[in-house]
Amino acid sequence: MTSIQDRRSPTGLPPRLEQVLVVPRSPEPAPRRSFDVFDTVLTRRTGRPAAVFDLVADRLLAAGRLAAPAGAFTAARVRAEPRLHTLSGRPPRLREVYEEVAHVLALPAGDVALFVETEQDVERALSVAVPGAARLLDQARAETPDGLVVFVSDTPHTGAFVRELLQRQDLLVDGDRVFSSADMGASKSRGGLFTAVGQALALPGSQLSHTGDNRRADVARAQAEGWSGVHRPEAALDRYEKLLDARPGETAGFGAWLAGSSRLARLRAAEAGVSPAVAEVAAGVAAPVLISYALWLAAQARARGLTRLYFVARDGQVLLETARPVLEVLAPEVECRYLHGSRQAWVLAAGAVSDEVLTSWLVPKPDSTARTALARAGLDAEHLWRAAGLGWAAPDRVDRVLSEPEAARLSAELQREPLRSRVLEAARESLDLASDYVRQEGFAETGHRSALVDLGWRGHSARAFDALVRHVGGAPVEHLFLGLYSGARLVRQGACPPVLSAWLFDRDRGRAPDPRRLERPNVVLEMFCAGTEGRTLGYRREGTRVVPVLSAPVNGPVLDWGLQDVRDVIADVVQGCCDGLTAQHLHVDLAGPAWDVLQAFWSHPTSAEAAAWGSFPWEEESYPPVYRLAGPLPPRQLLRRLAPGRRALPFNSWRAGSAQLQREPWRSLLLLSAWSERRPPLRRLPGRLRHAARRRLGG
C-alpha cells in the first residue's frame, strides 16, 4: 500500500493540497548571452597579439615613418598598455597607448595619429571570424526572445572599432551591443567590466551568461561579478602554435604567420568534421615543417641559380604541393616537376654500371624477409625455389624475418655465383628503361641547372640517380634533402659522390640536435609525406613514352585512414602563410621551431594523438608490409618483445605512441627500454625489470 509520504511531490505536500496552495512558477527567462571577441568569435591570421605590433612597425618602417628600431617599437607598445592601466587605474585607450610609446621612444607627438591608424589597418587586415562562430552566435540568438547578443572585450580599441571588425565578418546584427574596456573604464581581467555592462543593460547578473577563451578573465571574473561563465578555448593557440610563435626574432615574424595559419586551418578542419587530434597535428606539426622546408628550397634555388626542381615520388607529392605556392612568391623563375622514382627503380638499374651501388643495395634492410631481400635484387622468390631450389626461397622460410646473421649470409650469396649473374641480368633490364625515363624527363638537356628534392636519409638513391644521369650523358644534379643520417658519409666518400645538402638535420656535418631527443625522425616525416599512389617499382614502355610501374594505382590503406584530410589541412595552412612571405624570409632558418613541434608530438603525444596517428598504416619494404605505427600490446607479448636481443616494436614504429596507449607499468617499462637503448651503460636495468615482471606473471 502506497503511503501519503510516498505520494508527495517535490514540494513535500500531497498532490491535491499542492494544487490548492502552490502558485505555479513562471519559467525563468533565458539569460542574455555575452561573448568575448578576440579568440572567441574573431581571431587573427597571425599568432600572439604582439605580432600585430610587429606588423605595425614593419609598415611604418616601409613608409619611412618610424625612426625607432622595429623591435624597440614593439617592446614599447607591449609595455605601454599595462603600465598605463596600473598608473591610471583604468584601461587605456589606443591613442593614450601610442602617446606613451612616442614619449618613451622620443618619437614625434604628431605621429601618434598615424600609429593609431596603422594599427587599426593591420587589425582590419588580420581579423577573421573563428570557424563556427557564426553558427555559435545563431544558436545563442535563437535562445533569446529578441534574437540579440552582447560582445564584451578587453581592448584599447573603441567599441565602435570592435563593432566594425565584427560587421566586416558578418557576425553582428542590428541591435547587438558591443562594449570595450577602453570605453567603459573597467576591464574583465582586473574586474569591474561585467558589473558595468550589466548596469548598461539594466539586467541583473543572474540573467547574463558570458562565453570566452580565457578561463580567468572570461569565466572566473564573470562568476565573481554574478554572471555565469562558459569556457570556450578552441580558438586559443594550442601547444604547437605557441611553439611556432615562440621565436619571433629568429623567424623574422614568420613564426606568427605559421601559428595563425595553423590555428585557422585546425579550426576549419574540426568544423568540417576532421578528428581534432588529426587536425591539430596536421596543422601544427606537419604543415609548418613542410612549409619551412619549402622556404629553404626557395632560398637554395635562388642562391645556387637552379632553374628546375624535381620532386621525387611518392614523398614528393606533398612536398611539391607545399613548395609550389612558396616558390611562386619567392622564386617564380624556378620550374617545379614531379619525378617518378624510388630506390627500387633507380638503385638496381644503376647497379648495372656501378659495382659500388650494387654491393650496397644487396644488403637487406632491418626486418626484411628473404622475399623482400630478393625482390630488391630483381629476383622472384617463387621462381628461384621452383627453378633452382634456393633454400632461402623455400615456402616455410621465405616470409620469415631475417636475423642479422641470416641477412649477412643472404647478402653474400647474392654477390657470388650463381645468383650474381641473375642479379646483373635484372639490373641491365632495369637500366635500359630507367635510362630512357631519365632522358625523357630532361636530364640529358643542356641549359638547365637542376636539383632533386626528396626526404633523404643516407643518399643511396641520390648516388644511383647520378650514375643514371652520367650514363645518359647528362650534367650532374644537386640533391636537396630534408634530412641526412650519419650513414650518408659513406656515399659522400665514395667514387663520384653526389652533391648532398640537407635542411633539418645532417648528422655528418653536425647539423642536428641530440638524437636522443627525437629518435628516427624519418618515421614521422615519411608518415606526413605519405603518397596517394603506390610505390614506383620500375618503368615500362607505353607507345613512345616510358611510364612508371606502380605497386598500386592508389595507396588504399592511407587514403582509408584519412590522408586526404591531412593533405587538405596542410594546403589550408600553406595558403594562409603565403600572404606573410617576404624576401627577407629567404634568409631565416626555421629548423628550430620545426624541431620543437616535431619533438612535442613524436616524443610527447597526447592519448588522443597516439590513438589517431598510431593507427596510421605504415608501409615498409620488409615484414609485415603494412602495420600500425603504434598500439597497445598484451603484457606477455610485450615482455617477449623486450627480451634481450629483440626490439620491443618493429624497426620503424612509434615507441612513444605505443607507450601512451599502454597501461602502467608497461608504459614506463617501454619508455625506459627506449631510453636505455640510447644509453648503452644502462641497458642492464630494463633487463632486471623484465626479469622481475616475468617472475610476477609466472612466465
Image (cartoon, helix red, strand yellow):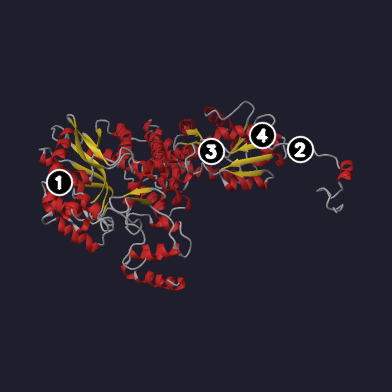
Q: Position of residue 206 (x, y in %)?
A: 71, 42
Amino acid, disc 1: Ala
Inter-mark Cα distance, 1 to 2: 84 Å
Q: Mark 2 points at which residue?
A: 27
Inter-mark Cα distance, 1 to 3: 64 Å
Mark 1 and mark 2 in contact? Answer it, CB < 8 Å: no
Q: Earlier in the sequence, mark 1 or mark 3?
A: 3
Amino acid, disc 4: Glu
Q: Mark 1 points at which residue?
A: 426
Q: Mark 4 points at which residue?
A: 143
Mark 2 crowdedness (10 Å alpha carbons): few <14, some 14-19, many ≥20: few
| Secondary structure found at label 4 | loop
Q: Position of residue 602 (x, y in %)?
A: 39, 53
Front-most of residues 646 and 573: 646
Mark 1 crowdedness (10 Å alpha carbons): few <14, some 14-19, many ≥20: some
What number is the disc on residue 38?
A: 3
Inter-mark Cα distance, 2 to 4: 14 Å
Label 1 vs label 2, nearer the camera: 1
Q: Which of marks 1 and 2 is nearer the N terminus?
A: 2
Q: Is residue 105 visible?
A: no
What number is the disc on residue 5?
A: none
Mark 2 and mark 4 in contact? Answer it, CB < 8 Å: no
Left or right: residue 441 compared with residue 161 = left
Mark 3 and mark 2 in contact? Answer it, CB < 8 Å: no
Q: Earlier in the sequence, mark 3 or mark 2?
A: 2
Residue drawn at x 30%, y 54% as measured from the top left: 623
Inter-mark Cα distance, 3 to 2: 34 Å
